[in-house]
Image (cartoon, grey):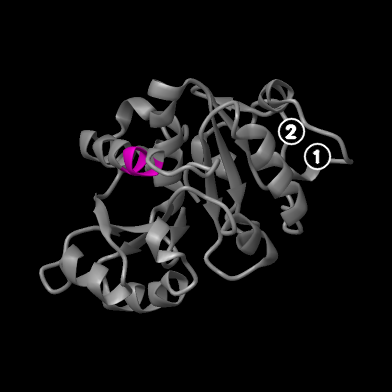
Amino acid sequence: MLGGCGGAGASVLAAVLAWCATDSAGPAFLIDCDPLGGGIDVLLGCERVPGSRWGQVRLRGGSLDPAVLRDCLPNWHQVSVLAVDDPLAPDPEALVKLVAAAAPAGPVILDLARWPSPVRTAALRSYDLAVLVTPAEVGAVAASAAIAGALDRSRAGLVVRGPSTDLPPARIGGLLGLPVLGRFGYEPAGRHPGGLDPRRIRRGTRQLAEAVLRQAAAAAEPVVAA
């Protein structure tokens, strides 16, 4: 999951995807890959839940047991969350190992930073579906163009945030060269003082997340969404 600009809502949608994935696939993983995003655990309201963050990840050879990985991470509504707590994290090699360990145990959702980095490069080497979220605004679409150009467009899709008569989703998809997966409206659940509350998520947002997951399920790579 990538935001085309700041405030696009990609982190909220990534969390909703992970939560919706638990309905059909059991436990899921949500991995925060944005060192300047403030920590996705804060967005979710689980920043005080015990468990490892990126700063505590130490991987040295061998294989990682998916059950051990799931149990050592904070749990948010059946989603195992690995949040960034250090601007120097995450490590691209560690990300590859974590994804390889997590994928057999459940769907993996990656919340990626907008700017190019070794971590983003590592994440985009293998995924089922890359989802770019962009507001329906001229400046946001222009910013999103550079990100869209870095994606494998045969395995990427676009979610448009908010309404616009001047820039309808089909036109934005044409400008960015990506198929439109749906429209993402304002999500008040993401502004809840106690963190993102699944019970408050709009029906339209859930339906969009379920459609994205179905699209991702058709692919054969181990990562559900990046």
Q: Which residue is mark 1?
A: 56
Q: As displayed, is residue 67 above or below residue 12? A: above
Q: Which residue is mark 2?
A: 52
The one of 7 and 209 positioned closer to us in this rendering? 209
Q: Which residues are magenta?
A: 212-216
Mark 2 residue type: Ser
Mark 1 residue type: Gln
The one of 61 and 136 positioned closer to us in this rendering? 61
* Residue 39 included in the magenta stretch of the image: no
Q: Is residue 58 left or right of residue 135?
A: right
* Residue 213 included in the magenta stretch of the image: yes
Q: Position of residue 159 (x, y in %)?
A: 30, 56
The one of 214 and 29 positioned closer to us in this rendering? 214
Q: Position of residue 183 (x, y in %)?
A: 23, 53
- Alpha-carbon neighbours of circle 2 within 10 Å: few (<14), some, or many (≥20)? some
> SS class of the residue under badge 2?
loop
Q: Which mark is residue 160?
A: none
- In space, the residues marked 2 and 1 are separated at their CA atoms by 6 Å
> SS class of the residue under badge 1?
helix
Residue occupying image coordinates x 89% and y 41%: 60
**Magenta residues, dominant SS class:** helix
